[in-house]
Amino acid sequence: MLLSILLAAGWPIYMLLIASVIGMALIIERLLYLRSKRVLPPNLLQEVIRVHQNGKVDSNVINTLEQNSPLGRVLAAGLRNVDSPREAMKESIEEAGRGAAHELERFLTTLGTIATLAPLMGLFGTVVGMIEIFGAQNSVGSNPAELAHGISVALYNTGFGLAIAMPTLVFYRHFRAQVDSFIIEMEQQAVKFVDIVHGVRK
C-alpha cells in the first residue's frame, strides 16, 4: 500500500520523506532532552546553597555540578566566582546561561525550517504533477494513464507536505515555549543564588 502510494506520488515525494525522517528524529531527540527533571533538577539550588554554606566547595564539586544539567552549569559558574563582587558573579552566570540557552535551543531552527519548507516541497510536487498533466495533452487527446499519474503526483505531494508540516510546527512551537520557560526559571534561580551568596536574601 505504502509503496504504491510512493510510486504514484512520483520522485518529488522522496524529498518529503527525507524531511519527515529528519523531523521525526529531531522531535524524538528534543522530547528526550527537554525534560524538566533533566534541565532543572528539583532541589538542585537548595543543595548548591547548602554545599556553599558548609564551605565544601572544591573543583570536583564544581565540575560535577557543571555536568549535572543546564541549571547545574549556570550555578557552577556562580560557584567559581563566589568570592568575586556581585556584578562579576552575575556576569559569569549570565555568560553560562547564554551557553545553556544555546544548548536548549539546539535543532529548533532546523525543526522550524522543516515545518516551513514541507508545504513548499509539497507545492513543488504539485507543480511537477501539473506539468505532467499538461504533458499528457496532445493533438489526438489525452493519455488517461499519464493524466492519472499527474493528478496523483499533484495531490499526494500536497497532502504529504501538509501532513509533515502540521505536527512539526506544533512540536516546534511547543519546544520554543518550553525552552523560554526553562530559561526564565534558570534566570530566577541564578539571581536567587547570587542574592543569597551576597546576603541580599536569606
Image (spheres, rainbow, N blue to C red):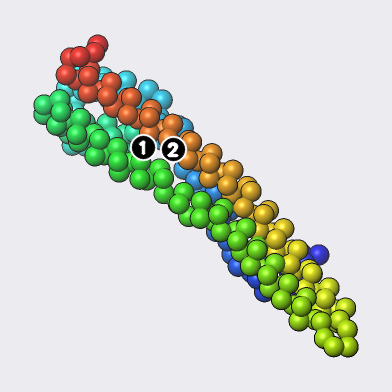
Front residue of 156/40: it is: 156
Mark 2: amino acid: Val
In the depicted structure, whether residue 113 falls above or below residue 47: below
Q: Residue at x 48, y 36 (%)?
A: 177
Q: Bin the neighbour count of mark 1 within 10 Å (Cα to Cα): few under 14, some 14-19, many 20 and up.
A: some
Front residue of 143/25: it is: 143
Residue 81 quadrant: top left
In the rendered view, does 112 fall on the left or right side of 126? left
In the depicted structure, whether residue 198 falls above or below residue 168: above
Which quadrant of the rendered structure holds the N terminus? bottom right
In the rendered view, does 147 fall on the left or right side of 167? right
Report the residue marked by disc 2: 179
Q: Residue at x 40, y 43 (%)?
A: 104
Mark 1: amino acid: Ser
Report the residue marked by disc 1: 69
Q: Position of residue 3 (x, y in %)?
A: 76, 69
